[in-house]
Amino acid sequence: MADFLNINEVLNHLDVKKSDTVAEFGCGTADFTLALAKRIDKGKLYALDIQEEKLSVLKNKIASHYANNVKVIKCDLEAPGGSTLRDDFLNIVLIPNVLFGVENKYGIMQEAKRVLKVGGQLLVIDWLKVSPLGPKENLVSVDEVKKMAGELGLAFKQQFASGDYHYALLFIKT
């Protein structure tokens, strides 16, 4: 049986501390947000998305899971400063299954770098081009993500499988 995407297994690759400040860029219905909120019970998590309807669903999930450490922000992550978060603020940024669906992939990566502290972790997860289930257009390859990250001065740390249909890349802000 195919392994779609094991969120907790993916998160185990991050160095997460209970007091970390974290953001999920393009949180959608926020499966990663809720899993991370449990791991940083003394920290703060920012769930960011441009789609109001997904954020409404998320707000209900947060309430039902008693995730008091999550702040929901409607924003355009493709725009410079679009997250509305301050520079050098976060320990971790996740960009799960977002790059394939946006026009300005580089802009989102640039925004992630801006808000990360030095030593902060950026985790990018996206669809493999060989996936029979995922989107067929606008996919971004591992090499393309590594190239963007390198141009932004993000150091590549690790690549790992995140299910049968996705890749995961971990970078560090230097």
Image (spheres, rainbow, N blue to C red):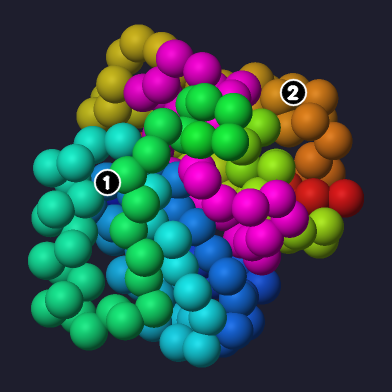
Q: Is residue 6 above or below residue 123?
A: below
**Residue placed furthest toward the top:** 137
- Estimate the x, y position of residue 131 in percent, counting from the top left: 35, 27
Q: In this view, does 65 lie above or below 60?
A: below
Closer to us: 86 or 11: 86
Let me know if residue 22 appears in the view: yes
Q: In which quarter of the image is residue 100?
A: top left
- Residue 65 placement, left or right of 158: left
Question: Mark 2 or 1 closer to N-term?
Answer: 1
- Residue 55 placement, left or right of 48: left
Q: In which quarter of the image is residue 109?
A: top right
Q: Which element type, helix, strand or loop, lies under badge 2?
A: helix
Q: What residue type is labelled 1?
A: Gly
Which label was assigned to residue 36?
none
Q: Is residue 62 above or below residue 76?
A: below
- Estimate the x, y position of residue 56 in percent, counting from the top left: 14, 53
Q: In this view, does 20 lie above or below 11?
A: below
Q: What residue type is labelled 2?
A: Lys
Q: Quadrant of residue 35?
A: bottom left
Please give the range of residues in magenta: 83-108
The residue that appears at 36% across and 23% down in the rendered structure is 101
Numbered label tally: 2
Q: Local crowd at mark 2 within 10 Å, few (<14), some, or many (≥20)?
A: some
The residue that appears at 51% across and 18% down in the rendered structure is 104
Taking the magenta stretch, the answer to whether it contains residue 64 is no
Query: Disc 2 designates what residue?
Result: 147
